[in-house]
Amino acid sequence: MGLVGTAVVRDGGAALPRGFWAAVRVWLEKPQVANRRLCGAAIEAEGTVPLGEGGEVSSPLIAAWGAGGQEGRGVSAGAAELGRLWREVRGQLPAGHGRLPPPLTPWDGTGRRSNLRAVLRTLLPRGRPVGPPTPPTRELAVQDVYNGTVTFLPLEEDSEGKYQIKKCNIYQIQLTHIKDEEWSVSIVAPFPEDWFSDGIAYPKLAWLGNELLSKLAKWSVEQKPSEFKSTLSLISVAKYSKVYQDLKEKYKEMVKVWPEVTDPEKFVYEDVAIATYLLILWEEERKEKGLTKKQSFVDLGCGNGLLVHILNNEGHSGRGIDVRRRKIWDMYGPETHLEESTVMPGDSHLFPDTDWLIGNHSDELTPWIPVIAARSSHSCCYFVLPCCFFDFHGKYSRRQSKKTQYREYLDFVAQVGFVCGFRVEEDCLRIPSTKRVCLIGKNRTYPPTECALIDKQITQYINNRQTCPVVMYDRRVGFNHKDHSDVFKEAGSELPENETETAGTIWMPGFQPREKVEQIRNCASLPRDFVDDVVLSVANLLLNATPPKSCSDMHGGNMNTWNQGESLSLKEVAEHLNKETLKRLKSEYGGLQTLLKNNHQVFEVLNGRVHIRDWRKEKPSRKTKPEVKQRLSAEAFKTRLCWFFLHHPDGCSLPSESCPYAHGTEELRQSQIIKKKKHIQ
């Protein structure tokens, strides 16, 4: 049996067969979206190959297949190599003479087109391989448009540098029209009994027949275009994979010694990923511009400073500036340059000798960074990763209901860059964050002689942002620096003829920088007695609701009925709280919902409804839980009193030995975390 799996799809929107080839393209270029053990794929060559004997490979089919990304730039040079490779391997097919073995659909060009399409790709593993280094995994994917198939031929390189087909792992993806709007997508392997799974590039056949097949079927009929570019579209994925693994290994110890209250894994690996991206971007820039010296930088709003630390260590001179010093700064050493200072957009905060300005989640400075870069020097570039939504003068106000708020804000920040005379490029990073889109201003649209004109346009644009309700921007068209005056005409104002200088030292007197002392407004700083009263009131409300829910369980051989209470919406809960309590909660970010989620020992908030948490239903922690989180969980065990033991009419639903909280003061342990903090002090 060679059929690995088949899925029937209905196409009511006339997406097929075009949608099938788009889905295949995703699997070819971005296999990591299906196979999480891959970092991506490098497309090394692409073109048409002859079905019969002999013949030459035609020019690459980038336009036909829609290939993109950095790898696509080197495809043309690989056309001749692709032709040689095709002639080398086609005769190795098990059926002989270039024919595919059954039950694969054979290639057939008789009386029709006599060419096939081929793509040579290298699969890039996500993690560093265990054991000795293994040769890269290469595949030749051969597309037969007429028959609706794409065949994947795994390749192995021998000692003489010639490629051999790894016959046991050949597989084919097929599209078949059944009738009317009904189609089927299938995966077939000619030698399933010999299939070799390495757990990375080649998972088990069951994975292909279930996970991959279901995704291909879904992608084939999806017609909603993405709002964002594909990840790492401006750099080489192959380079990124290697550099990221090297840096991750180099800085992994930071996770174990992280002194901040933030999640160490998220912040360390996110900054490693951003540093990787910048290092490769800057390497490409040096090649393009013929530079030998590594770029300098200033990170505005550098936060924990880890990105600055990594870039400094990797040979780039630069510094980070933030309004508030972090504890971790002391761990980096003198070679990492960090400054505690407030950045006010103005003439006193320009960086004429700096190559790049960085804004990594820089909040209120985000829209100002293109402006600061433009006014620092004609050669200064910028990289911003927008997160929180800020305008020049405060919080960003949404103006377009047809876009998501995130997409609209990205378009605004890109517009700022265009007005400042940059050719703004957009890319999507691979970081553990929902805000992953970066904007890059690397090249200018105007010569140095026009700096004064651009400076006037910037000033007028900033002024108009305070009064203009709508400034339209179409990112598909972009800005031409000669047409910037149209933006200001739409804003209802002409460029002043005599305005040649920026207004004073501070460009916007009403600008509000971040406060030096961070205000905690996530309910964590509320008085303990106030929080306890709210928790008890809400719990009693749920427990006394009609009808109450009860859960039965066996404890010590006796049937124990435990009152689980009723669930209520957040609105219903709020209606039962007094006005003073609600007023106090509204001054905190997240209000009532945040307070209830903070008290996760007692409550569970799901889809806007509040429940009493039943600890018997909690899933046991996964064995793959990170070491840091395992250690923190163990250190927190029995360091707080059990709320249910003290307040619930039926007591705790768990016996003392199973409950992570203390059943009485005699069980309390001193927190190891507190001990460590005292020791550090």
Image (cartoon, rainbow, N blue to C red):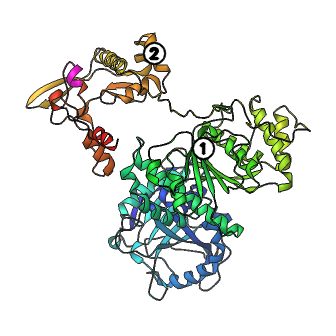
**Looking at the picture, how far across and down is residue 359, in whole percent?**
61, 47
Quarter of the image with the N terminus is bottom left
Q: Counting other residues with Cα less than 10 Å from the Cα at mark 2, is it few (<14), some (14-19), or many (20 or more)?
A: some
- Residue type beneath disc 2: Leu
Residue 108 magenta = no
Compare marks 1 and 2 and give the one earlier in the sequence.
1
In three-dimensional space, the C-alpha distance between marks 1 and 2, rounded to whole angstroms, equals 32 Å
Relative to 652, say whether 273 is above or below: below
**Looking at the picture, how far across and down is residue 614, in whole percent?**
26, 30
Left or right position of 429 against 76: left
Q: Who's the residue at 68% across and 68% down the image?
A: 291
Relative to 216, say whether 390 is above or below: above
Q: Who's the residue at 75% across and 53% down the image?
A: 377
Residue sitting nearer the eye, 475 or 486: 486
Q: Who's the residue at 38% across and 57% down the image?
A: 253
Please tell me whether mark 1 sits on a helix, a strand or a loop. Answer: loop
- The magenta segment: 644-649
Residue at numbered disc 2: 582
Quarter of the image with the C terminus is top left
Residue sitting nearer the eye, 89 or 78: 78
